[in-house]
């Protein structure tokens, strides 16, 4: 039996899906994200470990990787070392191959990838492409899991300098029960502030994005400040869609497809998201699938496998 591998590597999570030659899903492996902002020759231990586990169990004929990062050659080297094959197709998330493969399912010309980062991608029927957002953390991942986490941290830390009582969200993030008040020395303030800062030091992208789950928990409790952060994230993501739509004009699209981890908590932001878009464009249809990118990657992997098998069969006949 021959198998092929569809891989989605994000900034937070990595998913590897093994399929047999009849296109049945055989097994799924999950590990930490490995999409990095720079390329290198260094190994990524957890990714190599998972890839080697797959290789030990299955004879993989072809590998298709959607990469949410810039480290293409690093990922290629890891995959090649594990699977001993040249049949590796790596396409960066910003190439939009998986995104558009997902969007085609709903006839959506605009696709929003909403996870640790955010990026809006679009194409019209004439083959013109548009991209908005996706500039990366601290710059332009508007509305993303990272942006939600950062907004919550900024709000909580600022609250320590005020005199109002801390909210439950602010207490959990800072580890403090009340704002910082008078102290007998500046060094006492320094020590207290350093203790709070240490919770997220160094300012790791994944750690900040993980705070999104804390915000979600407080949204579940109906806390207004957490709900407001989510609402603002929805509006920020909506602005990416409106900008993208405006650049497509005079071509008009009626549907948007949204994929990524934030879809799992869309109940807290999609009303604001959809309302802003409807008020500022002609778009009326919205489709959500947290696993949209991996589904798009699977479709590409299927075609890559069939292409590889076709080539092998030609050689065998010769």
Image (tube, rainbow, N blue to C red):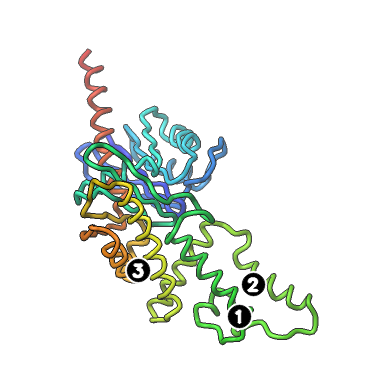
Q: Nearer the viewer, mark 2 or mark 3?
A: 3
Q: Is residue 191 above or below residue 302?
A: below
Label annotation for residue 269? 3
Residue 226 placement (x, y as % from top left): 44, 75
Name the residue tied to disc 2: 196
Element type at marker 2? helix
Element type at marker 1? loop
Pointer 1 or 2: first along the chain: 1
Pointer 1 or 3: first along the chain: 1
- Characterize the local packing of mark 2: few (<14), some (14-19) or many (20 or more) Cα atoms within 10 angstroms: some
Which quadrant of the figure contains the N terminus?
top left
In the picture, measured across the screen, residue 314 lies left or right of residue 206, that is: left
Q: Is residue 128 above or below residue 228?
A: above
User: Residue at left 37%, top 62%?
Assistant: 262
Q: Nearer the viewer, residue 310 or 109?
A: 109
Q: Nearer the viewer, residue 63 or 275?
A: 275
């Amino acid at each position: 039996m021959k198998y092929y591998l569809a891989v989605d590597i994000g900034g937070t999570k990595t998913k590897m899906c093994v399929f047999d030659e009849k296109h049945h899903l055989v097994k799924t492996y999950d590990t930490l994200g490995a999409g990095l902002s720079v390329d290198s020759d260094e190994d990524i231990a957890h990714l190599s470990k998972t890839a080697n586990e797959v290789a030990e169990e299955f004879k993989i004929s072809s590998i298709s990787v959607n990469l949410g990062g810039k480290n293409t050659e690093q990922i290629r080297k890891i995959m090649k070392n594990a699977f001993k094959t040249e049949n590796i197709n790596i396409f960066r998330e910003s190439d939009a191959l998986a995104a558009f493969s997902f969007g085609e399912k709903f006839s959506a010309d605009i696709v929003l990838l909403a996870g640790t980062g955010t990026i809006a991608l679009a194409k019209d029927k004439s083959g013109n492409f548009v991209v908005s957002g996706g500039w990366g953390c601290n710059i332009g991942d508007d509305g993303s899991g990272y942006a939600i986490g950062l907004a919550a941290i900024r709000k909580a830390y600022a609250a320590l300098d005020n005199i109002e009582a801390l909210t439950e969200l602010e207490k959990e993030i800072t580890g403090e029960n009340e704002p910082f008040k008078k102290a007998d020395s500046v060094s006492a303030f320094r020590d207290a502030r350093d203790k709070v800062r240490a919770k997220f030091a160094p300012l790791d992208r994944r750690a900040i994005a993980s705070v999104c789950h804390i915000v979600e928990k407080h949204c579940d409790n109906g806390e207004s400040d957490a709900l407001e952060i989510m609402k603002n994230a929805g509006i920020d993501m909506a602005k990416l869609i409106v900008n993208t739509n405006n650049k497509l004009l005079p071509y008009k699209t009626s549907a948007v497809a949204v994929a990524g981890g934030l879809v799992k908590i869309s109940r807290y932001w999609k009303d604001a998201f959809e309302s802003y878009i409807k008020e500022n464009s002609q778009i009326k249809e919205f489709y959500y699938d947290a696993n949209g990118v991996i589904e798009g990657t699977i479709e590409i992997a299927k075609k890559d496998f069939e292409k590889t098998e076709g080539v092998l069969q030609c050689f065998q006949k010769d």
